[in-house]
Image (spheres, rainbow, N blue to C red):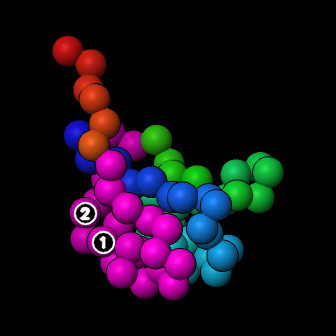
Amino acid sequence: MRCPAVDLSECVDCDGCLEVCPEVFRRSDAGYIEVADLEDYPQACVDEAIMMCPAHCISWEETETAP
């Protein structure tokens, strides 16, 4: 399964991902961007967040699924 990931060391806190894809990206209680734990991620929405990110810190990662 593919899951979006945010490299927090590169993130500039522009909130662009929150604006274009709020169902996937949100702020944690500590104030950092985090990815919601979903069974399926809307590809078009995440792809738009990736394209709009000025720091290029959002990407897709392959995750292992339980058998």
Q: Position of residue 23 (x, y in %)?
A: 46, 61
Vertical comparison of 30 with 45: above or below:
above
Q: Is residue 15 magenta?
A: no
The residue wearing badge 2 is: 43
Q: Are the residues at dot 1 and dot 2 in contact (C-beta closer than 8 Å)?
A: yes
Residue at left offset 35%, top offset 67%: 46
- Of the numbered discs in the image, which one, if any, rests on residue 47? 1
Q: Which residues are magenta?
A: 38-61
Disc 2 marks a residue whose amino acid type is: Gln
Q: Quadrant of residue 45?
A: bottom left
- The furthest residue to the top: 67
Classify the position of the N terminus by image quarter: top left
Residue 56 x/y as whole percent: 46, 75
Say which of 5 and 39 sits in front.
Answer: 5
Q: Position of residue 54 (x, y in %)?
A: 51, 84
Q: In which quarter of the view is residue 60 placed?
A: bottom left
Q: Is residue 67 left or right of residue 40?
A: left
The image shows residue 20 at horizontal and vertical percentages of 45, 78
Name the residue: 79% across, 51% down.
30
Left or right of 64, for residue 5: right
Label 1 sits on a secondary structure element that is helix
Identify the residue at image location x=50%, y=48%.
36
Q: In the orientation shown, which residue stands out farthest toward the left?
A: 67
